Amino acid sequence: MEAAWSLTTAEALSAFGHRDERNGLTDEQVVKLREKYGPNELDKEEGTPLWKLVLAQFDDLLVKILLGAAVLSFVLAFFEDHQEEGMQAFVEPFVILLILVINAIVGVWQEANAESALEALKQLQTCNACCVRNGELLPTVPASELVPGDIVHIGVGDKVPADLRLLKLKTTTVRLDEGPLTGESETVMKTLEPVKRESRIQDKRNMLFSGTTVSNGQAIGLVVATAMRTEIGQIQANVQTASLDEEKTPLGQKIDAFGELLARVIALICLAVWAMNFRQFSDPVHGGFWLGLIYYLKIAVALGVAAIPEGLPAVITLCLALGTRKMVRRNAIVRRLPSVETLGCTTVICSDKTGTLTTNQMTAVAMAYPGSAASELVEHRVEGTSYDPSGDVIDFNVEAAPGALELVKVCALCNQAKIRFVDGKYERMGEPTEAAMRVLVEKIGLRDAPRPTDPALACTAANDFWMSAHPQRAMLEFDRDRKSMSTLCATASVAAAPSLKDSPGRLTRSRARSATPSGKNALFCKGAPESVLARCSHARLADGTLVTLSDADRAAVLNTVAAMAARPLRVLAMAVKEELGVLADYDGAEGHPGTKMLLDPTSFSEIERDMVFAGVVGIKDPARAEVKGAIASCATAGIRVVMITGDTRPTAEAIAREIGLFEENEDVTDRSFTGQEFFNLSESDRISKLTSHSLSMVFSRTEPRDKQALIKILKQAGEVTAMTGDGVNDAPALKQAAIGIAMGISGTEVAKEAADMVLADDNFATIVAAVEEGRSIYSNMKAFIRYLISSNIGEVASIFLTALLGLPEGLVPVQLLWVNLVTDGPPATALGFNPPDADIMLRPPRRADDQLITPWVFFRYMVVGLYVGFATVGVFAYYFIGYDWAGDGHPLISYTHLTNWGKCAHFAELYPDIPYEPDFSAWAANGGLDLSHKPCDYMNGVGKRTASTLSLSVLVTIEMFNALNALSEDGSLLQMPPWANPWLLLAMLVSFSLHFVILYVPFLAQVFSITPLSYNDWILVLAFSFPVIIIDEALKAVGRMRQRAALRQRMKTE
């Protein structure tokens, strides 16, 4: 039904052919309507097929390059000389494919843990309904079977099964908890009158929305919307829409951009290396042009493998996973790994108010009662911000103010709520404001019954005392006209009742006696101050004296109430009536003279006349104690905070001033809007007011779609937005934001499932700690990216120089894969444990489009990488032409012979003046090879194994030194020594151990085409490796000078 809220009850009923609410639909009508509207269930999104998940893991440019390299390697393996190589030729493609399969398995596993926000939304409707059909009341009709036109009965505690148009109130009032849907902190009183067609959701007071809960009263409603046509269904549709707008995290985008650049560079270098060696395709050593072409194609493949940092995705994932473990210790549970890094560049936090910045637990924070005169209220602050009964009433002593006992009794007796301790936390049943009054009674406490240590009893002891002393006889329900509620209670003998705690802030026995004569009834009333005061003729002063309440006194009290309401507090007035006439001895008997009066609601106002004013209680949903400090930390860190709430504007602005979003007396004309005001502006004005400055803002009376629209505007402006929330109404915005953050304790399952991160302690300050962790993780990720990329550039430089100089192949692809995946992995991971910089939360957030690799960083990569290439090629060449102190007797040859190794069979013709006659006898005597019959094999195949091993060992050692260099981007190792990160030292030990394993285990040495090294060999390795430390220290010194110059320039500009 369209706009059912704008119709009268008669019009709504007639739209479905009903005359009244008594008969309901017939079975035939139900069948037809179900065929038209379908079951009352939210749509379930189909999951992604497994084959699509698998294919998605290969939809990455670097992965495609590796896959192509593996396929090409398999093809080329068939051209190997199987007599000598055997299955070793297939090791490289097998390893590449194994890497890709492992990455795919991990990716599919992560994707399989899919978002289940929609399923959680669906669960909100899993309930039964009390429905009228065929003139009969059916108590357990499954909610999924309801159709538009059904008549439904609901009562306290029921979950509304569909969107209902209210038809009839079975009690004088009906209240619903719509907080999870609208964000309002107070329950909503429902009415029957129609409202405007264009009304916002908070103004549809005649509608009961699916998924909300009845907190007070009973009613009858007409089903007007089911399934996806309900308000909660529209939220699901918005969640689906928001999921379509999801983008990769800033780091993911940078890695993708880097991958594309790297792919182009790899392709160019590989093509250049292959083309550079065109003349060598026909060298005799290859056995023909085509075999030479294939050989250099293998070199190009090796170059591609060397250039791709295969371990980078795994190390990033592991680093993020380690970050999530750190965050768990700080009460932040990360559901999606990339969110960890996203936190580091968060520029705006859009926060829901209720349950996020506040506790979402209505709390009595002030109580006031007449002091020495009726017009002078004495106010006391009440400790606490939740339903936890711990805390005191500050500076309150009932010995000095025994009259305040009447206020305490009203709080306990005029109350239908309950507080209970369940699963380690206090929770309410009933109205939030009444629950707050219950907690206030417990904080005041009892004397001879000290506060119990059992938390389950601590929340009920004092209230149970008063209710047992004053059994309830009748209730005068709240209605909108008199704006009050009363209970008629008996009075037990005070002498027999337990006395009260004799200490500051507690009631005492000597002054605790009621003014009501023992054995008579008393009326305890609470309600709106202006209404209750109008019906009070007297006031109870602090010392227990009863005085007349004049019009001037009422005006003075209302002025005090207005000041409290401006803070803002919801103020309730308390009153007692002791002279009740025929109701003084009412005991509930049907024949009692007072029964007729209590059954007639129109007489309630008369019963409540000539009451005694006892005081007022100020209640609010208080700000979390830690939020103000967290807001200040956000400001220091350059993070903007925007409050988005469904609550009223005065309440939102007051909370904003309390937590530091606004200054106490600051003009917030252009920084505080209701949702309707803001979205009535033109699009350009909306964008300007939201994005033209970096000051905090407040949006009140917002609907779910408003939050989503605000997030979208910020997103389009280039902001990295985090959205916090706890209700169903927050789910679309949580999904839309760069990172959605849900409350773990008070949050609905819908919000948790839509979020990227869940706060286990519902603490806004935890977000700030998570941002700090995110920034630290990003800094550490830059460190290991710097480490891995500079190492890979070194490998590329090594192969490129080898091809450029015409040297034999020093490093084979399987060795490069081993270095990239295994040897480099532990140090890169350990760099994720680098301690955060001391000023990490004093810097402004980096922008999402900041470069991951700046020109200066790239220059550093190139300098270090070129040295790595020089060292690995240099040690390989040095072994053949200058390493005469090796101690193994291997023969030395000339540089000319080495660079023309492919023409070795024709050296006598090509270089008659430089004879190639290596003596292998000494080498053979020391355990080497005697290649006298095949001297050309010395520079190729098994003969070059020691040189290749030296080259590989220099590469591994340099990369370990590079890991030390990566401890700090610009800090010297003298400033941040290696032991600053002991995990890195352990990782280096692991990497060297793994390298030793393949060196000294014969089977593995055979697989990797290497051989064990001697003591002298290791001295040579260190001599070629250590200079990388000196080179990077020099580059860091230049970097520090650049930073100082940039700082001076910025200070000069400012």
Image (cartoon, rainbow, N blue to C red):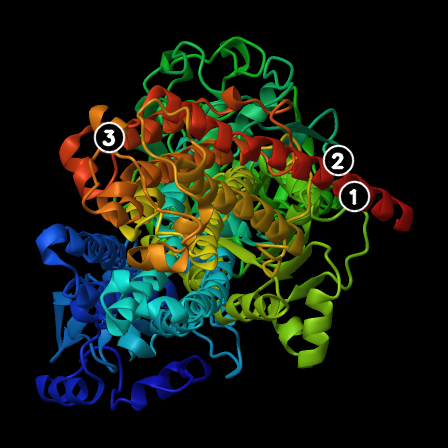
| Res. 628 visible in picture | yes
Q: CA–CA distance between discs 3 and 1?
A: 122 Å
| Mark 2: few/some/many CA within 10 Å (<14, 14-19, 20+) | many
Percent of width and height locating residue 521: 41, 33
Mark 2 and mark 1 in contact? Answer it, CB < 8 Å: yes
In the image, what residue type sits under mark 3? Ser
The reply to whether dot 3 and dot 1 touch (C-beta < 8 Å) is no
How packed mark 3 is, by other alpha carbons closer than 10 Å (few <14, some 14-19, many 20 or more), is some
Q: Earlier in the sequence, mark 2 or mark 1?
A: 2
Q: Which mark is residue 552?
A: 1
Disc 1 element: helix
Are there few (<14), some (14-19), or many (20+) residues within 10 Å of tag 1? few
Spatial CA distance of label 2 from label 3 is 117 Å
Q: Which residue is drawn at 14% across and 67% down?
A: 142
Rendered image: mark on residue 372 = none
Most foreground residue, 220 or 534: 220
> From the viewer's perspective, is 966 left or right of 191?
right
Residue 612 in the image: state x and y as whole percent.
59, 36
Q: Earlier in the sequence, mark 2 or mark 3?
A: 2
Quickly name the residue at label 2.
Answer: 375
Residue named by callout 3: 921
Rendered location of residue 87, percent (x, y):
11, 53
Q: Can residue 762 be seen in this view?
A: no
Q: What element carries label 2?
A: loop
Q: Under tag 3, what secondary structure?
A: helix
